[in-house]
Image: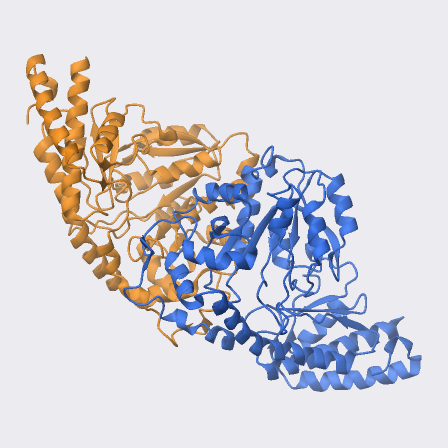
Chain colours: A blue, B orange
Amino acid sequence: MPLLTALPPDALRDYHQQIRGRYDAFAARGVKLNLTRGKPAAEQLDLSAALLDLPHANDFMAGNVDCRNYGELQGLADLRALLAPVFGVTGDRVILGNNSSLSLMHDAVAFSLLKGTCDSERPWSKESRVAFLCPVPGYDRHFSICQEFGIEMIPVPLTDTGPDMDLVEKLVAADPQIKGMWNIPKYSNPSGTVYAQQTIERLAKMPTAARDFRLFWDNAYAVHHLTPERIEIANIDEACARHGNPNRAFIFGSTSKVTFAGAGVGLFAGSKDNVAWYLKRIEKRTIGGDKVNQLRHLRLLKNTDGIAALMDRHRAIVAPKFDKVLEIFTEHLGNSGVAEWTTPKGGYFITLDVAAGCAKQVVKLAKAAGVELTPAGATHPYGNDPDDRTIRIAPTFPAIAEVSQAAEGVVLAVLLAATEKLLAK
Amino acid sequence: MPLLTALPPDALRDYHQQIRGRYDAFAARGVKLNLTRGKPAAEQLDLSAALLDLPHANDFMAGNVDCRNYGELQGLADLRALLAPVFGVTGDRVILGNNSSLSLMHDAVAFSLLKGTCDSERPWSKESRVAFLCPVPGYDRHFSICQEFGIEMIPVPLTDTGPDMDLVEKLVAADPQIKGMWNIPKYSNPSGTVYAQQTIERLAKMPTAARDFRLFWDNAYAVHHLTPERIEIANIDEACARHGNPNRAFIFGSTSKVTFAGAGVGLFAGSKDNVAWYLKRIEKRTIGGDKVNQLRHLRLLKNTDGIAALMDRHRAIVAPKFDKVLEIFTEHLGNSGVAEWTTPKGGYFITLDVAAGCAKQVVKLAKAAGVELTPAGATHPYGNDPDDRTIRIAPTFPAIAEVSQAAEGVVLAVLLAATEKLLAK
């Protein structure tokens, strides 16, 4: 693999011709592959096949609660108790939702806009301006919620240890209109970044001009390890409480990528006051979540060991796909000087950074060759990656042979875009 | 049964003593009965016991959709097609939600406040004032949504044919801040009122000062008949379209009282533009509802006949409880001059109107005797029944022997409160 940025013009032209030929040959295969979204593969869903029959006839009572009927706004106590330690809280500070933690995040924003948080002087919608800090690269659906509601997004670079805390501290201390910050603290989407203990400590401790500032703590990949190392992050709830900011974190999680992506159980967790506030809001919205599905999950997962064992089986399916992509990237892009990528230890994504100004072209070329990628820019607020270099790779859904082919297509698109860019200089 | 209002003072005092004695004897029994909420009885939930095992292993595909995975924002097409005719629309104009239509109503209000409807000039939250018409007696959870968001509630009397349309037409024509109106058009909660064809026609046709006025059409009891007569109401969607107001109705429904109250499928339906608008909003909130539960419902209900047959079985359980209450009311309150009640042909409630100024006292007395009733006032906006006379009776949940006892307790509380009131004059 030549260092493309160092090639003399003639060699570069030759190399471009060669890549062009390989790319055309790949495109001629007529593959139709998709690396766009973080969806589990069917094989992963099969791991929870028992849910299709659970909870079984005559099994509908949880203690003295008839799961089939109305009620239990907060969700079944036993499932709350089971999931609470995963998110560093106690069961009384968990609220179970229906099948999507994204919905709970959306609603937490909507409730804050319409009613204000328990620490707000007024509803956020009555503020002249509301802004959120957005570590980049980040999750497009977080950004879409802000965009939907006219919340200004302020990008903050994500480093290897989490968001650039010097910048974060400076921003939140100065601007009382910064009301929130998105965080995927573990195996972040799409970089796989794990927030360091010191980062979490600083987030919990930092003075904020807005007294109702909230960390939207999307711990989506809490148990989604890709290596035998089960990384633990610092407990945000405990840290916030210790620093006198007990209500700072809105914690979100779900079983979506533990059991069924479309039929799991989402959860909200937080301080006593945050939970009381959230319950007060959803009390107007529902008489309770789907408790039969909660019972189903309780029967399937059973206990903490049950969750861990299930996640090991996910890893056995998912990790080889990540390994395959990384192997192909290393083989074909290593030392090329035109691409860098992350090596996540968990989660659902790899971030591929290509030569500046090339991401859109890479996605376009890949698509023309039959490999669909997440649109370039999706990793940034307003879909705007100012360097046009970051691409999210989602290798979980296709079969490994397809992942391998798709990675090959991506590699060719990267090399072709890069050589074209270099030749145009 | 003497006409209490016509009794001479001495006879009234004697009667009061007699009722006091019967009431005390009832209270001494120490019963603990609950007629507060419209919950199905366990026996009704048993009718859908098959849901506890459905959809069964290996049954997770709906056409080419893997119900276990993400996707299908609008919900499974086959279930939409099955439920659509119940609500007078086509499947392409139905959106399936999760387990609560109340949530969909709440969200329709929240979305309108934060974003405006597809016909709004600005988000409702940017209006100086937003008001809803509230037919009374009505459903307390509708009113709670308005109260939560500071929406002014304007009560409108419900007549035997639906809301007082002369008043409704006058109000909506004059006040551009009246943006919505709650309606339970069939077997209304709590009166059992069925909107007449002419009422629905006028609601669809009436000029409104607000061009983004919406009928919140909560057709919660569409198939919940209590008699062999399966009453059909006029099609609000068709009527609105015919009168050039195609986007006027937001239609809501659910299977909550068809299958499992806590684990059914809710739905939103409406015009093409309303559906597009609603999808655009929930696209920010979720990747899709719980499709496994949708499939479960499809497998259980199968077709329109399946729904009708299931509802007949519900009726066989529920109707005798209503009959028992009505029988006891007639026997003990008939011609008393101090109570009137509705005889619903469907739905979940009976409205009991007691002597003016007595409802709170009746609820209090009933409670002291071991019979819990919905709080007096709950049927009116802000919990304020200006005449203090309307009480909601919900006879579905307890067993019939308990319903019978509870009705007896209610009767004694009504008679005691009325005689006390008359004696105090």
Name the residue located 46 percent from the left edge and 33 percent from the top edge.
B151
Is residue B148 toward the left or the right of residue B308 in the image? right
The number of callouts visible is 0
* Residue B341, horizontal then vertical, whole percent: 18, 34
Front residue of B211/A404: it is: A404
Quick check: A9 above or below A121?
below
Q: Residue furthest front?
A: A242
Quick check: B141 above or below A16?
above
Residue A405 visible: yes
Name the quarter where the C terminus of chain A is drawn.
bottom right
Quick check: A207 above or below A193?
above
* Residue A386, horizontal then vertical, whole percent: 78, 58
Quarter of the rendering containing residue A320: bottom right
Quarter of the rendering containing residue A225: bottom right
Name the residue located 78 percent from the left edge and 49 percent from the top edge.
A167
Name the residue located 59 percent from the left edge and 74 percent from the top edge.
A396
Residue A369 visible: no
Quarter of the rendering containing residue B380: top left
Quick check: A350 above or below A324?
above
Name the quarter where the N terminus of chain A is drawn.
bottom right
Is residue A297 toward the left or the right of residue B396 in the image? right
Front residue of A2/A216: it is: A216
Front residue of B374/B368: it is: B368
* Residue A364, horizontal then vertical, whole percent: 70, 71
* Residue B85, horizontal then vertical, whole percent: 32, 57
